[in-house]
Each structure stands twice: as C-alpha cells, then as structure tokens.
Amino acid sequence: MAQARADLMQGRLNPFGTRIDEILSPTEGRIGDHRVILAGTNNYLGLTFDPDCIQAAQQALEDQGTGTTGSRMANGSYGSHMALEAELADFFARRSVIVFSTGYMGNLGVIGALAGPEDIVLLDADCHASIYDACKLGGAQVIRFRHNDAADLERRMRRLGERARTALILVEGIYSMLGDQAPLREIVEIKQRLGGYLLVDEAHSVGVLGTHGRGLAEELGVEAEVDIVTGTFSKSLGAIGGFAASHHPDMDLLRCASRPYIFTASPSPSAIASVRAALQALRSRPELRERLWSNARQLYRGLAALGYRIGPQPSPIVPVLLGSPEEGVAFWENLIERGVYVNLVPPLATPGGQALVRCSVSAAHTPEQIERIIQAFAALRAPAAKAMAGA
C-alpha cells in the first residue's frame, strides 16, 4: 500500500486528500491557483449555502453552543434531535427513526446490532464500505451476491433453505461508484417468496428519487416491503449525520444495543438545525429535484456523446472509467487545470479494479456550468481514448 501510494503521489496534486482552499458557492471553489467548478461533491440539491439552512444553523449555534459533548445515550439527545427524528419518521411514513452521528455510523449501528454470529447477511458485492464493516462488527456470516444480479441472490438464498427466512438482505438505492440502481422490484419479489429482511441504504437516493424524494423504494412503489431504510445527511441534506427508519415495533431497542449510538458523540445542534431546514426544503421544493435531473441527463448525454465509458444509466453520479491508476491521476489533474474538480477514485475502491473519475452534479449547477464540464472532458478525449484502448 505504501508503494502504491508513493507511485500515485508523483503528480502535482495530492490525490488522497485534495486541498480545496476556498469554497465560493455550492458549485465553485478554488484549488491552489485554479478556480474550479465543483463537480465532485454529493451536494445533490445544492443546499449547503441555502439561506434558511445557514440561518437555522447559526441560531442553533448561538442558542445551544458548538456541540453536545456526549453520546445519544448520555447527554447528547437534545430536543432538536428528537424533533428531527419525528420529522424524518413523518417524511418516510415510518413508525420510528434513529439519528446517528454519520451515515457510516448509522450502518454500523443498525447492521452491527441486528446481525450477530448466528445470523446470515446477503449483500450486494458493490455495497459501501460501511456495510461491509458493519457486518464485521456484528460477526454475521456474510454471503455476497453479484452486483445487481437478483438471480444470483435467489440462487444463494435457495441454498440456505429455511435459514433464508431470517437472513438480512443489504442493497443500496443508488450505488456510489457507478451511479446505478438496485433491481429492487426483483429483490422484493424474491423476498416475498423466500423470506428474509430487507435493508436499503438510500444514502445517494434520498432527495434524488421518488415522487417525494424518499428514494428508490418510493420510486418503484415497494416501500412496504423494505424493513429498514438507512441514509445520510451529508448528501442531499447538505450537512452531516445519519439515520435509520423502520416500521418494526422493536426498532427503539437498537438504542440500547447499538455501539456507535451509545459510544459516539451526537451530532452538533447546528448540524441538526441545518438538516431540519434542508428536509423542509426537500419536501416543499420539488423543482430542486427537477433541476438536478435535468443537469444529470445533460452531463450523462454529453459524456456519452464524447465516447467515454460511463455508468450504465443516467444518474446524478456519472463515472468515467479510465485505465491505470497513473493515467487516472494525470487525467484528474488535467481536469483541475481546465477548471473542473471531480473525484478521483483509485482501483482499491472501484468495481473491476480500474481507476475512474466520478462526477456528481447538483441542482445548483447551471446548464452553462454543465457544458463547461463537458468541454473540459472533450479537451482530454484523445488521451482518454488511448488509455481505454490499452485497458
């Protein structure tokens, strides 16, 4: 790992922690001497500079201070934490919601507490690292099925026999690397026939999919068959924190069993206040979702027309698959020099072991900014074609 890191540090910029020197708006920033369009954030609804969110956070900062200095189990459950849980329960039309310090902690806290050494977890091979780590925390037996392959899930469940009836199935609404969606209808149909419990991580799909923005399960009309929804506040809601929502009558028992809930400091009052304002914006301003998808389709079509290898379907996440890690770093640096920042994802974190750059669009991007992103990729098309030919 040390050698691989050293090899990728030969360029002009640090690919393992880009220093963004100034944030100018939800869509623009400065990296060194380069003013760049921020096309590598998860700020899907563009709410990080929303006046209502900022005012709510500032007021909470004045009224309640900088932090709770304690966990949810101890002194870190303020009235605002409880209010946000109630508002999220209403939004998701679920019996109860638990708020965690981050989305990562939410998955650790829920999956790690639910699935112990005697249990079986079936998870999509491309699930997020937090889901894999949660399974390790609980010690469950882990069975991976091929990415977005419902038939492979069914084969593996049938081999379990009666044990399939109590297995936990883990998938995501939108996958963070390729921007594709889980085949949730097919998975629900398998669950109805063979049993099991279904948890859907809607981190990248809340605020993005569904008539009301509740995610993929709402988009496909299968919310009643999803036992637990997890997600984050660090994407469409523009802050930090995480949640789990469920109809299960014993959901609140997790507050007594979830180590990340019990032993991690709770989200700051300012973050909670900002999320509450962002949730209101998500619910009352559907035009944000409409602008997001208009921008996503514009970028997806533009990069596809240039001949890049991109994700399998239009999405606010638009990956561009490249060749070697070194080629990926060079491509990423050249984009920054042309005024566009995207995420560089090295092979250790990518499906298939290839470097990729990941674009993420926002409702705050203008059509002109999307076109400038496309033109920056067009300027690098020849080197990219050479890299892909050798891959």
Image (cartoon, helix red, strand yellow):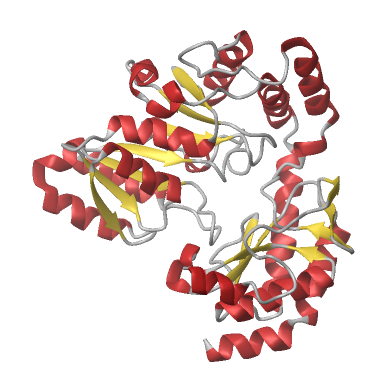
How many numbered marks does the figure carry?
0
| Identity of the residue furthest to the left in this view | 161
- Quadrant in the rendering for residue 112: top left
Residue 167 position in % (x across, y down):
22, 40
Residue at 62 percent of width and 76 percent of height: 328
Residue 22 seen anywhere in this rendered image of the structure: yes
**219 horizontally vs 63: left or right:** left
In the displayed structure, 182 sits above or below 110; it is below
Residue at 36 percent of width and 41 percent of height: 134
- Quadrant in the rendering for residue 164: top left
In the displayed structure, 122 sits above or below 92; it is below
Residue at 81 percent of width and 21 percent of height: 58
Nearer-the-camera pick, 27 or 5: 5
Residue 136 position in % (x across, y down):
31, 44
Residue 188 position in % (x across, y down):
33, 43
**240 horizontally vs 225: left or right:** right
Nearer-the-camera pick, 364 or 266: 266
In the displayed structure, 126 sits above or below 232; it is below
**113 horizontally vs 237: left or right:** left
**92 horizontally vs 118: left or right:** right
Residue 225 seen anywhere in this rendered image of the structure: no
Nearer-the-camera pick, 227 or 141: 141
Residue at 75 percent of width and 81 percent of height: 380
